[in-house]
Every structure is written in C-alpha cells, then in structure tokens.
Image (cartoon, grey):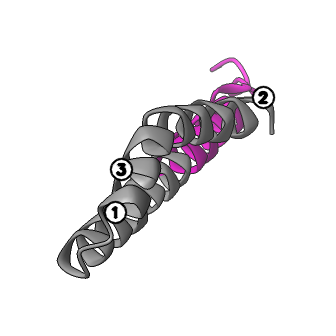
Amino acid sequence: MLPPPRRRDSLAPAFLAAAVLHVGLFLIATYAGQLVNITLAVLIARYDEAKDEARAKKIYNRAFVVVPAFTVLAWVASILV
C-alpha cells in the first residue's frame, strides 16, 4: 500500500509573490526618480534657450541634490512597504 500524499503547505509561493511585489515597487521608484531627472533637465534646457542663465544655473545646482535625494527616498519607501 502507498503512503498518503504529502501536503504541500509551503511558504514559497507567498514569499515569491512578496518578492515580485517589492521588485515592482522598486522599479516604480526608479522610474519616478528618472521622471524627476527628466523634468529638471527639460526645465534647464527651457531656461537656457530663453537666455535666463541665472535660473538655469540655479535649477542645475539644485538638481544635484533633488534627484538623488528623491530617488533614495523613493527606494527606501518601496522597501519599507
């Protein structure tokens, strides 16, 4: 006589689903950071074409802080969710 089949009460499917969700959130956070980067680059180009060098330089200098800070905060938020 054959033994009864084993029950498959594994946590692997739940763990895999959670991992896929976190990867998706991390990618969304990365895309949000890229969107901020592109937006600031367009603003810099727009002010540069309008010969408003002071505003273009101001946005350029702030972009060095804003883009990395926003991206890192978005990554941390995606990990903590």
In this rendering, the label closer to the viewer, 1 or 2: 1
- Residue at x 52% of width, y 40% of height: 23
Q: Quadrant of the N terminus?
A: top right
Q: Is residue 24 visible?
A: yes
Question: What residue would you read off at disc 3?
Answer: 57
Q: CA gap, disc 3 to disc 1?
A: 16 Å
As shown in the figure, which amino acid type bears the numbered disc 2? Asp
Q: Quadrant of the C terminus?
A: top right
In this rendering, the label closer to the viewer, 3 or 1: 3
Q: Is residue 31 visible?
A: no
- Residue at x 62% of width, y 47% of height: 21
- Residue at x 73% of width, y 26% of height: 11
Magenta-highlighted residues:
1-27
Residue 74 image position (x, y, % from top left): 64, 41
Question: What residue would you read off at disc 2?
Answer: 9
SS type, badge 2: loop
Residue 64 image position (x, y, % from top left): 43, 34
Instruction: From the viewer's side, name the closer residue of 9 and 18.
Output: 18
In the image, 47: left or right of 68? left
As shown in the figure, which amino acid type bears the numbered disc 3? Lys
Question: What residue would you read off at disc 1?
Answer: 38
SS type, badge 1: helix
